Amino acid sequence: MRLEDFDFHLPEALIATRPARPRSAARLLLAQGGQIEDRQVLDLVDIFRPGDRLVLNNTKVIPARLTGQRHRASAQGEVSARIEVTLLEPLADGDWAALAKPLRKLRQGEEIRFSDVLSARVTAIEAGQLRLAFNLTGDDFDAALAEAGAMPLPPYIAALRAPDEADKADYQTVFARHPGAVAAPTASLHFTPELLAALAQKGVEFTEVTLHVGAGTFLPVKVDDVASHKMHAEWGEVSARAAAQINATRRAGGRIIPVGTTALRLIESAAVGPDPAAPVLPFCGTTDIFIYPGYRFRVTDALMTNFHLPKSTLLMLVSALIGQDRTREIYRHAVEKGYRFFSYGDASLLFPECRI
């Protein structure tokens, strides 16, 4: 498989820069039984069956984009530089991995001040990234970051507008619980408390898992041979309770439907061996699972997801689930019908033709 096999033309006008309001008013492309239907997210109550189990990623996006000042003494006096930092992930020693722009204006040992209370020292610069040691930890750090930071909007939105206060709510799911992501599980952004309650009333069940989405989700694939691509690693957890719920639903004949590619990648990582009948086990650690055509799904019966970038690993995952020709057909339909794309865009609900 070549990278060009996953390319398509997307008019820039279809890139959503704001979410639908209310969230559940977004459009929904339903691909099921060989058909394509144009629906709304609110229609999920009619589409799902009693006994279906939705797997939700309850990660919480941190306001990981910071703007600060670096001060340095020189023969002409103190010289300052404006530095933009994007946090990537916490490290085992308490430091944070981060990106900085412009990186060339920083040296190891220098301090960046982000607010009156929040600052960080550069402990290392390597492979185009920083290691930062912040002056605060725990709840104090979280409070200072919430005050000084901005939501880390994806590059394709940030190129069209700057993040603002509305994004702190818009770019967060209603069931976000565990801080650590620097990108949202965007298919989950469509859910409201009212929609979740209506689904529960219908008999749909929910399981929460945690995958802290990293900035690597936006990295382009740079190899022509798709199979040689190396995925970024992300930390995730499937609790014993979550694994038991998924296994019980499968035994009862219910469908397992992850909401978003992050939830899908995590539960597939927690599945045991190549046998589709094997159970899901508790999982805690990093996963770099790469799902592309030829992958044999072990847990997933369908997927709710937004529309993805051309040539992206997420588009490859969708193609693995429903087939490359079917994916091309669906994306052509979405473009022709004016669906809104990417993180703040519309949703799709995709059933493989052999698993409905």
Image (tube, helix red, strand yellow):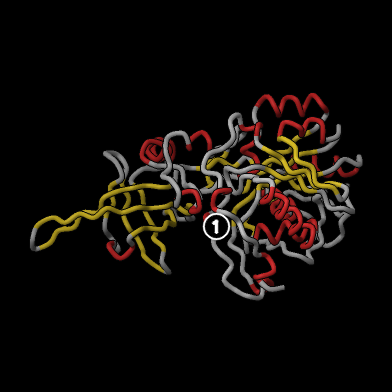
Q: Position of residue 196 (x, y in %)?
A: 71, 29
| Residue drawn at point x = 76 percent, y = 56 percent | 329
Could you tell me residue 289's position as x and y percent?
68, 61
Pick the residue in front: 273 or 188.
188
Q: Residue at x 43, y 40 (%)?
A: 138
Secondary structure under the numbered disc 1 in the rendered image = helix
Q: Nearer the viewer, residue 339 or 247?
A: 339
Considering depth in this image, is 284 or 303 the residue closer to the camera?
303
The answer to whether residue 230 is left or right of residue 264 is: left
Estimate the x, y position of residue 147 in percent, counting from the top left: 37, 36
Count of all numbered marks drawn on residues in the image:
1
Q: Quadrant of the N terminus?
A: bottom right
Q: Which residue is mark 1?
A: 218
Residue 25 in sight in this render: yes
Q: Amino acid at mark 1?
A: Phe
- Can residue 272 be seen by looking at this rendering? no
Image quadrant where residue 246 sits: top right
